[in-house]
Amino acid sequence: EFNSSPYETGYIKFIEGSGHSFWYDLMPESGKKFYPTKYLLIYNDNKTVESKSINVEVHLTKK
């Protein structure tokens, strides 16, 4: 549940083998409203990546 989450902010970062990277916010900053149309953009472009040549980082900050 978002409001009782121990995390304040977060994003997921994809780093391709070529060094190119892109990221998506997972949640808004503390005190800001959650808008699914903004924070679920990970599904917006449906980019396909080669799983053998990509690293995924999840960055979360705690309260």
Image (tube, helix red, strand yellow):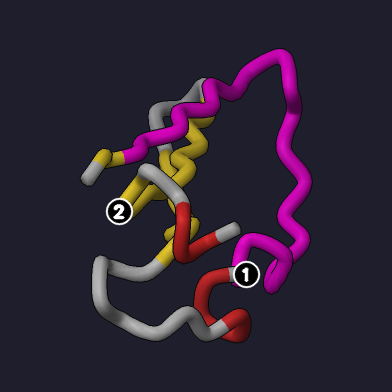
Q: Along the polypeptide, which appears first: circle 1 or circle 2?
A: 2
- Count of labels shown? 2
Q: Residue at x 26, y 41 (%)?
A: 61
Rendered location of residue 1, percent (x, y): 60, 58
Is 50 left, or right, of 54 in this rendering?
Answer: right
Is 3 left, or right, of 48 in this rendering?
Answer: left
Is 42 left, or right, of 34 in this rendering?
Answer: right
- Foreground residue, 4 or 39? 4
Q: Nearer the viewer, mark 1 or mark 2?
A: 2
Asked which secondary structure carries label 1, the reply is loop
For residue 4, above or below residue 31:
above
Q: Amino acid at mark 2?
A: Glu
Q: Amino acid at mark 1?
A: Leu
Tags 1 and 2 in contact by the CB under 8 Å rule? Answer: no
Q: Which residues are magenta?
A: 41-60
Residue that mark 2 sits on: 8
Residue that mark 1 sits on: 40
Rendered location of residue 13, percent (x, y): 45, 40
Q: Residue at x 51, y 80 (%)?
A: 38
For residue 22, above or below residue 37:
above
Q: Residues within 10 Å of mark 1 (few under 14, many from 20)?
A: few
Q: Residue at x 43, y 59 (%)?
A: 25
